[in-house]
Image (cartoon, grey):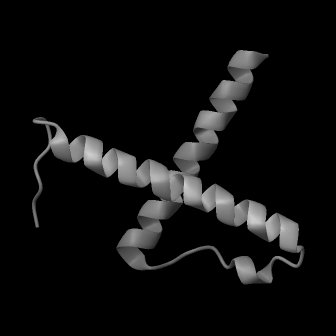
Amino acid sequence: MLGRIVHYSIDAVIISAFLAGVKRSTGLTPALSGVPDKDVRHLLESYLEIGEYAFDFAVVFFGRSTFFERKR
């Protein structure tokens, strides 16, 4: 049971980080203004912020690795 919860939590963070990457590269983000409930909207905003943190962490981690190089 605990393994399944951890697995789903990691999957949720990966999806949120993917959405953060889409936001960074295209500017597109989920339209949270269409969510009528203020508490649910705040929960979704927090969820997306976790993805931003995970995305930033991954960029720093990969940027310091010798296995990746930055090409512009």
* Residue 13 drawn at (x, y percent): 57, 45
Residue at horizontal 72%, vertical 22%?
Answer: 4
Q: Where's residue 21, x and y in %?
A: 42, 62
Q: Which residue is drawn at 47% across and 53% down?
A: 53
Furthest residue toward right: 37
The extreme bottom residue here reads: 33
- Label count reads 0
User: In the image shown, does 43 or 34 lie closer to the viewer?
Assistant: 43
Quarter of the image with the C terminus in it: bottom left
Residue 42: image x %, image y %? 76, 67
Is 8 placed above or below 37 here? Answer: above
Q: Quadrant of residue 9?
A: top right
Q: Which residue is drawn at 36% across and 71% down?
A: 25
Q: Name the spot of residue 15 as percent of width and height, x first.
A: 57, 50
Q: Residue 48, relative to residue 63: is it above or below?
A: below
Q: Does 48 sit left or right of 25 as displayed?
A: right
Look at 85% across and 74% down and name the residue there: 38
Front residue of 29 and 39: 39
